[in-house]
Image: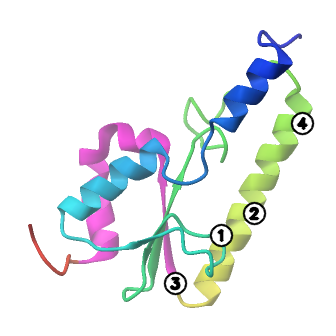
Amino acid sequence: MVDVLSKKQRELNMRRIRSKDTKPELILRRALHADGYRYTKNVSSLPGSPDIVFSRRKKVIFVNGCFWHSHECVWGQVVPATNATFWSEKRQATVERDARKRDDLQAKGWRVATVWECELRRISEILPEIRKFLGPARCQG
């Protein structure tokens, strides 16, 4: 099947996809900050450059896009109409890389959580789980 966008339009779309400070990350970071949690962003010295790092707690949170990381939700199971083999291989490599980075972090004594883009659509439902994972915030307000 032929792509509905021109090559130039597709390139522009792909360039706009960010790896840092994505909308889902911003939603979660704002909620955590409002709860009194303090963190560091995208620590490149750790395997996988986790999106949100709580160094003193030795905990990290990855905020994963459902499509890119092949989540089991509706958005993660989308199969592109064009270049399906390429996308399948690329997404599978991402899943494998995620698992390696998670294992590397855990081997270094870090606890790891993953929050999916689709879960952030109902953030009030997942915040209690995240708070439980992190433990009490140092300050309130």
Q: Is residue 94 magenta?
A: no
Instruction: Name the N-terminal-most of marks 4 and 3.
Output: 4
Q: Nearer the viewer, mark 2 or mark 1?
A: 1
Report which quarter residue 17 is drawn in.
top right
- Which residue position holds label 1? 48
Q: Mark 4 and mark 3 in contact? Answer it, CB < 8 Å.
A: no
Q: Above or below — where is 40 with respect to 91?
A: below
Distance between mark 1 and mark 3 Cα atoms: 12 Å
Q: Position of residue 68 (x, y in %)?
A: 67, 43
Residue drawn at the location 63% of the way across and 35% of the way down: 16
Q: Above or below — where is 98 with respect to 107?
A: above
Q: Secondary structure at mark 4?
A: helix
- Which residue position holds label 3? 110
Residue drawn at the location 25% of the way across and 63% of the way down: 33
Instruction: Name the N-terminal-most of marks 2 and 3.
Output: 2
Q: Residues within 10 Å of mark 2 (few under 14, many from 20)?
A: some
**Label annotation for residue 86:** 4
- Amino acid carrying mark 2 in the image: Arg
Q: Secondary structure at mark 1?
A: loop
Distance between mark 1 and mark 4 Cα atoms: 22 Å
Q: Mark 2 and mark 1 in contact? Answer it, CB < 8 Å.
A: yes
Q: Secondary structure at mark 2?
A: helix
Distance between mark 2 and mark 1 Cα atoms: 8 Å
Q: Which residues are magenta?
A: 111-135
- Amino acid carrying mark 1 in the image: Gly
Q: Position of residue 83 (x, y in %)?
A: 89, 26
Q: Residues within 10 Å of mark 1 (few under 14, many from 20)?
A: some
Q: Secondary structure at mark 3?
A: loop
- Amino acid carrying mark 4 in the image: Phe
**Label annotation for residue 97:** 2
Q: Mark 4 and mark 2 in contact? Answer it, CB < 8 Å.
A: no
